[in-house]
Image (cartoon, rainbow, N blue to C red):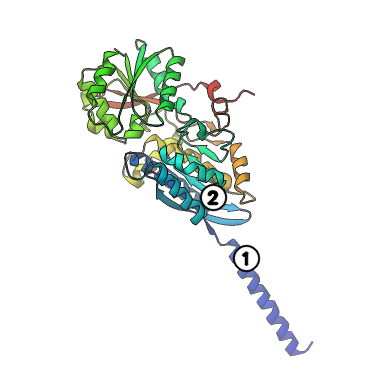
Amino acid sequence: MNRTALVFVAFVIAVTLVSGQAFAQKAASPKTLDIGIATPLTGPAAHLGANIRNGALFAIDDQNAQGGVTIAGQKYLLNPIVLDTKMNAATGKVVAEQLVYEKKVKVVIGPFIDDAIGAQPVLESNKILSFIVTPSTKDMTGPNRPFTFFFSGPIPQMFNTVTAYVQKFYPNVKTVVSMVPDLPDTPMFLNSSQMMCKLYGLNWLDVEKFPFGTTDFSPFITRALAKKPDAIDTNSTGGNMGGLCAQLIKQLRQAGYQGAIYVPALPPPGAVEEVVPENYRTKIVTNDIDWEASIVSNAYRDLCRRYVKKYNMPPIDMVGQVYHVAKPFFEFLNGQKTMDTTKWMEGFANYRWKGLYGKEAAWVGKPMFGINRMPFRASWASEYINGKLQTKWEAPIPMDLFVEKK
């Protein structure tokens, strides 16, 4: 082989090596996988939406810090696209269409109640995996809605925690009246309250409904107290009306009511302490959590501490609820062999993971809803005693209501 031929062969080898290296680097370089975060960021539920958004962003940041996800051999970093649904059905639909048709996302996290009603048909029909707070109507979950997962847990479990606490620590409480805003999702919350009262031997007397946005609760309180309840259930007021739930508690005490008040759906962090005078903050049972209490899991405590450090504000329980589902989902995605969302849905529906609440987690709910699409939420119950929140007990979960018998 002459000198010219040798030079040509060397050139070809060099070009091949460089091209191969460039191809390998290109294949290894991460792309972005867009994740929709669609949740109320303005309006009365903005405090919930902000916590949902932040919990989802925490899960995304933590997964990216671990290298993102690799799907079908391609590495991806997760890229959040955050949009405001305003807790409005029409806006929820528009936001879902934008995420699906313009942004081409395969995953959406965060729709709440009315906005979820608008968004879900768009997401389901396009086989988009969605993580919604809760099924605000009965037809939002079931075998014909397989792509919708719910991160806040079964609503009856939310009522189970506070009702079980009242039954155990206030044995003289026998009767309950609910006070709740008059909204489309109200029957679902009231049914859960009645179900848990029956389970724990309490007599649910009646409900006093008030218009959404009410600030002066006095006429409704007068009617509620005329029924002589041993306990008042604020029901969905904290979730749907935010800080006005604290106003309801304050006005109940101002009206002379000294009995137990239980708060299943939480107002914004610090609202009770800011609005309700310290001498009124007693016999108030809540799903709020003092994460520094010894009964709380280390994983949940660590998440809350990191949240305060990053956002300079305390989280509500919904931060843990969305993280408890979103981070395991990203871990599940890492190593999947396909971008087919039907395969993702089928696989994740059977996934089990190390839970944030100190227990193994899995999807439950089939006995009640016909499909397993909810995780258990935290069952730590708290009470304001002498003005201070104390988390000291974990409520038992009535497993037969949520877990399919084998």
State the separation of the CA atoms marked 1 and 2: 27 Å
Q: Which mark is residue 24?
A: 1
Question: Looking at this view, is 369 or 4 the one in front?
Answer: 369
Q: Hey, what amino acid is under mark 2? A: Lys
| Quadrant placement of the N terminus | bottom right
Residue most extreme to the right: 1
| Quadrant placement of the C terminus | top right
Q: Hey, what amino acid is under mark 1? A: Ala
Residue under the image location 58 percent in, 44 percent down: 332
Residue 39's x, y, as percent? 41, 44
Residue under the image location 54 percent in, 43 percent down: 124
The residue that disc 2 covers is 106
Against 396, is 288 above or below?
A: below
Against 26, is 363 above or below?
A: above
Kindly tell me whether residue 211 is visible in this rendering: yes
Element assignment for label 2: loop
Rendered image quadrant of residue 352: top right
Residue under the image location 39 percent in, 22 percent down: 162
Residue under the image location 56 percent in, 41 percent down: 147
Against 3, is 129 above or below?
A: above
The reply to whether dot 1 and dot 2 touch (C-beta < 8 Å) is no
